[in-house]
Image (cartoon, rainbow, N blue to C red):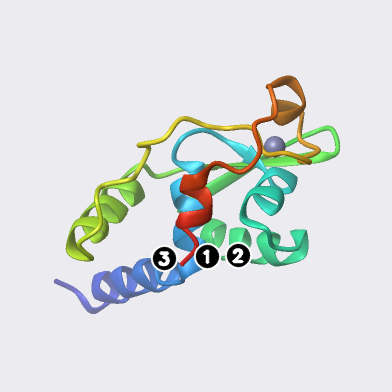
Amino acid sequence: MSQDAVQLQAELLKAMAHPFRLRLIRELGREEECVCHLSALLQRPQPYVSHQLAALRDAGLVSDRREGQRIYYRVSDPRALRILSVVDEMAGAPDTVLAAPRAAVAGCPCPKCGDAPRIGHPIRRQAAVW
Ligand SMILES: [Zn+2]
């Protein structure tokens, strides 16, 4: 394997090797979400969420699209979800990638939560804070 290939592997793993980015990949693996939703769901300021999303985008793991005032992100390489699933197994956690359906977040200003019944933060989300 060439030095360039090894370097690329390290860069990909480095981009994923951050607790918050792992949470982002997990959430975006289900469906695309806007920054405001991720901010409400994961309870972090939007600039912080945007910064972490930019790191994932630069690594080619997520992509974005603009719709009006909002920017939506999604996992652009589904192999990232396979890595996450393997890491779940290695860490002794059940495979939670895509395990839970999307739930509306109380107080989230995104269009999807606005359309859906508001059920607040599910217990799974509270327990999943790493
Ligand atoms: Zn939302």
Does label 2 or label 3 sit earlier along the sequence?
A: 3
| Kind of residue at badge 3 | Met
Measured as percent of width and height from the top left, residue 116 is found at 68, 22
Along the horizontal axis of the image, is 71 left or right of 88? right
| Residues under numbered marks 2 and 3 in contact, where contact means CB atoms less than 8 Å apart | no
Along the horizontal axis of the image, is 19 left or right of 38? left
Can you tell which of label 3 and label 1 is closer to the viewer? 1
The residues bearing labels 3 and 1 have C-alpha atoms spaced at a distance of: 9 Å
Mark 2, secondary structure of its residue: helix
- At 76% from the left and 59% from the top, the residue drawn is 46
Measured as percent of width and height from the top left, residue 127 is found at 46, 56
The residues bearing labels 2 and 1 have C-alpha atoms spaced at a distance of: 8 Å
Against 91, is 105 above or below?
Answer: above
| Residue that lies at the very extreme toward the left in this rendered image | 1
Mark 1, secondary structure of its residue: helix
Q: Nearer the viewer, residue 78 or 92?
A: 92
Measured as percent of width and height from the top left, residue 102 is found at 52, 32
Against 116, is 128 above or below?
Answer: below
Can you tell which of label 2 and label 1 is closer to the viewer? 1
The answer to whether any part of residue 60 appears in the image is no
Mark 2 Cβ inside 8 Å of ligand 1: no
**Residue 65 picture quarter:** top right
Along the horizontal axis of the image, is 29 left or right of 79? right
Residue where numbered disc 2 is placed: 52
Against 19, is 121 above or below?
Answer: above
Against 11, is 123 above or below?
Answer: above
**Residue 16 tag number:** 3
- Image quadrant occupied by the N terminus: bottom left
Mark 1 Cβ inside 8 Å of ligand 1: no
Mark 3, secondary structure of its residue: helix
